[in-house]
Amino acid sequence: MSNRTPMAQKTTGLVKLAGLVAAFVFLILLSNTFLQGMRLDLTENGLYSVSDGTSQILNAIDQPLTLQFFFSDEATRKLPSTRIYANRVREMLEEYVQRAGGMIELQIIDPLPFSEEEDQAANYGLQPMQAGRVTGSVYFGLAGTNDVGDVVIVPAFQQRNEQFLEYDLTKLVYTLSHPQQAVIGLLSELPLAGGWNPATRSLVQPWAVYSAISEMFEILQLSKDSLEIGEDIDVLMLVHPKRLSENALYSIDQFVLRGGRLIVFVDPLAETDTAANDSQNPFNDSVGEKSSDIPELFAAWGVQFDPGLVVVDRQLALAVNTGGSRTTEHIGMLGLGDAQLNDADVLTGLLSSINIGLAGHFTLADDATTTLQPLLSTTDDSALLPISRFFYLQDPNSLRDDFEPSGKSFVIAARLSGQVDSAFGETPPASQADIENAHLAKSTDSVNIILVGDADMLANHLWIQVSNFFGQSMLSKFANNGDFVANALDNLGGNEALISIRGRASFSRPFEKVETLRHIADEQFRAKEQELQAQLDETEKALDDLQAGERDDQVLIISDEQRAQIEQFVARRSAIRKELRLVRHNLDRSIEKLGRNLRLINIALVPLLITLLTLALIVFRRRRL
């Protein structure tokens, strides 16, 4: 039995508690001193870790960069979700600073109303957010500068784009550290750059997509007759390639095998191919001349594309004008929505709609060594029709005759990756025997190719409306076709590290159990609503029958039996409404109970488990001593 007095025991306990507090403070100070910069990401999807591609780009920065993170901290006190996301962006930027080895300076700025910082944010072109109850401008964006004065901005961080946060930040850093424009080598059979239209015998303006990419990239026009793809070309863009010579095919083949990036638009029936309409064109022998394909290269890459088949889809059919004011749905002219765009790829993840016209589809051969990642796809209410069905088509409704859906989705655009062999085998063609570059029989690394089965998607009429306003052309976009092309070239124009970065998981995790409870209750709620509506319909019909029996003096005579039926219905309606309230009440109660349990686990149970584990370790160590 202990001889210590209660007062002495109390004093000893207080001393031990004070010692624990002092040790805790000492450990915090020690960690801040010696563990500064060390990070451990325990999130399920590594939300606060950067990919290998980002690490490569950060390690390769050769000039100092300044990142100015503008966030209206004071103005967003009542916007917790915005502040949580802003905190994630800030911590991700701090991670970039840590990994950049002193080459990135991060400035965090709160642009208060009417301050110089707010003027600075506006001058950079950052976009104020609409923040509900908050009055005044709320900024949540990023401006980056390099030592030569280039400026790249993220106008406003949107939480719906969260999965591409790392890509957006890394792309900004890469653009600042590589300010030169990417060079696009363009080989096109369609008049993207404008020129002479043989059908109308007149000059035409450049297409809107060409004007847009001309502002972003340096474009070199290439000739298929003497195709030379220089080392300065970053991306090769083939649009509707037809009848390419052996030399041209070999140049493309070797460019891809050397690691060159390629985007190719082929088409089973390009309606915008005006050259095929030229009666003086010696190659124009049929409407089939509007088809394009590069079968020799596709075969070497393990890709199958049939230029004689057009993809049709009843669910995606666009309305087209058939003369006068009449319109009808054309199952070959397709409007792809969110569900048909790959939301996990940076090319299509932020787009909402793309329109295509008479497109083909891609598949992989059985012996392919490559991987086909879909970007644009149809629904399973689709089929393949021969291009002959579209020759001189007068009534698009006739395409629905004998339509049988395939029950599967067709890939209209895709990324192609993997190692491939040369289409020319181990030796170059005889015409290329004296070339300076050594022949490559196999790709040096994984190829990076984007395949698109429709060239008409580049035309103005499928994605943009041009109107005249006092002599000025006004462009109004109604689809994201141009954005898709710009994203593809921008992505391919970066280095391999940037291209390798994909969308990340979302920071905002839904409460799946809560959503399940809400879904079940909503189903019950809707069932009760339908039951009530059915009862109301029956009552209205009964009242109509009663009104039909009115006398000439407009006095409605209701029998005791009818009155009893009406009273019974009124009582039943009240009971159903009570059940509806009970369903909603039970839903709220279930969610509140789940919330209480989660708070109990987070606030009490987890700390308790940690405490018990710590005490168990202490007891274990004492017993060993």
Image: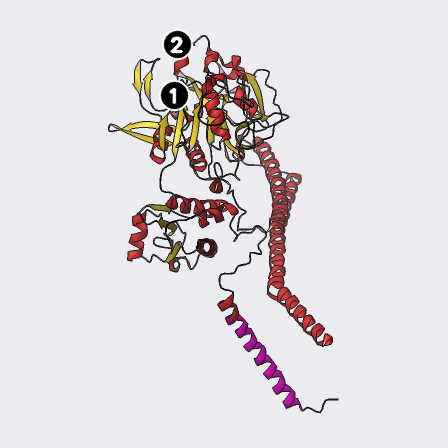
Look at 54% across and 47% down and name the residue there: 505
Query: Dot 2, crowdedness within 10 Å: few (<14), some or many (≥20)?
Result: few
Q: Earlier in the sequence, mark 2 or mark 1?
A: 1
Residue type pointed to by label 2: Asn
- Work out whether 401 lies above or below 610: above
Report the disc number at residue 541. none
Quadrant of the rendered image containing residue 214:
top left
Secondary structure under badge 1?
Answer: loop
- Work out whether 307 lies above or below 257: above
| Label 2 sits on residue | 281
- Work out whether 339 lies above or below 141: above
**At which x and y percent is residue 184?**
39, 31
Quadrant of the rendered image containing residue 97:
bottom left
Is residue 392 visible in the rendered image? The answer is: no
User: In front here: 8 or 49?
Assistant: 49
471 is within the stretch colored magenta: no
**At which x and y percent is residue 142?**
38, 50
Please state the extent of the stretch shown in magenta in the rendering: 1-29
Query: Dot 1, crowdedness within 10 Å: few (<14), some or many (≥20)?
Result: some
Look at 46% across and 9% down and name the residue there: 286
Residues at marks 2 and 1, CA–CA distance in whole angstroms: 18 Å
Report the disc number at residue 223. 1
